[in-house]
Image (spheres, coloured by chain):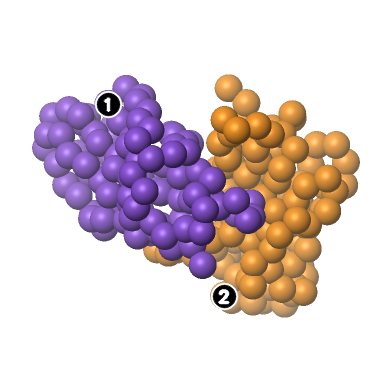
Chain colours: A purple, B orange
Amino acid sequence: EDQVTQSPEALRLQEGESSSLNCSYTVSGLRGLFWYRQDPGKGPEFLFTLYSAGEEKEKERLKATLTKKESFLHITAPKPEDSATYLCAVTNFGNEKLTFGTGTRLTIIP
Amino acid sequence: EPEVTQTPSHQVTQMGQEVILRCVPISNHLYFYWYRQILGQKVEFLVSFYNNEISEKSEIFDDQFSVERPDGSNFTLKIRSTKLEDSAMYFCASRDQGRSYGYTFGSGTRLTVV
């Protein structure tokens, strides 16, 4: 069974203080690893899909990287509006479903 | 930007009652999903739907649950006899074909069973 573990559970940063969120995964044949942002009471908002080890994608202050065992979401010079829960999820080649981690709750302090 | 629309945003129902949660997926998407998130817990897969039939379902999706695509635009989740433990946020999602796909989620329906 696919498993996704995210760390840390919560992270508080000062505005401008860069850091990284971790997503470790176990999957039988990775089809895709997904990063989502979730604001309170809202649905997950798609950020990135990564397909193979060594792949990197960027969007504004966010950069996602992928190895064979984990993915990192790097946030550079964050702003208060980056505060949210960041979710990692995987799919494998055998099925359609996304398996989610529990998320990292990120708070950026002005 | 195209979006997945869910109604209602909040539904309160009595235990044992039937509820129908509604979703309008993105128009050119072919794969449809329901997920749920109990407060403070992770997002969990319920069911996937393609070509007018269920393609996969989880252990959560028992006989009390059903899905339907009654016309070309709507996708519904029915819970026949709600239980207190069905209280959760329910998210609809859709995606298109091809390698560069991302699952697009709606804003969710908060279901409260009292």
Q: Position of residue A46 (x, y in %)?
A: 48, 36
- Given the image, on which type of amino acid does mark 1 rest? Arg
Q: Chain of mark 1?
A: A
Q: Position of residue B2 (x, y in %)?
A: 62, 26
Q: CA distance from mark 1 to mark 2?
A: 39 Å
Secondary structure under the numbered disc 1 in the rendered image:
loop
Q: Nearer the viewer, residue A45 or B99?
A: B99
Circle 1 crowding by C-alpha within 10 Å: few under 14, some 14–19, many from 20: few
Q: Which residue is mark 2?
A: B85
Secondary structure under the numbered disc 2 in the rendered image:
helix
Q: Is residue B86 above or below residue B32?
A: below
Q: Nearer the viewer, residue A29 or A12?
A: A29
Residue at the extreme right of the image, as rendered: B71
Q: Nearer the viewer, mark 1 or mark 2?
A: 1
Tags 1 and 2 on a common chain: no
Residue at screen point 51% across, 59% down: A28
Q: Quadrant of the N terminus of chain B?
A: top right
- Given the image, on which type of amino acid does mark 2 rest? Glu
Q: Is residue A14 left or right of residue B98?
A: left
Q: Is residue A10 above or below residue B94?
A: below
Q: Is residue A17 left or right of residue A78?
A: left
Q: Which mark is residue A61?
A: 1
Q: Which mark is residue B30?
A: none
Q: Quadrant of the C terminus of chain B?
A: bottom right
Q: Is residue B58 visible from the viewing direction of this image?
A: yes
Q: Nearer the viewer, residue A62 or B6?
A: A62
Residue at screen point 70% across, 38% down: B25
Circle 2 crowding by C-alpha within 10 Å: few under 14, some 14–19, many from 20: few
Q: Position of residue A88 (x, y in %)?
A: 40, 49
Q: Position of residue A106 (x, y in %)?
A: 26, 45
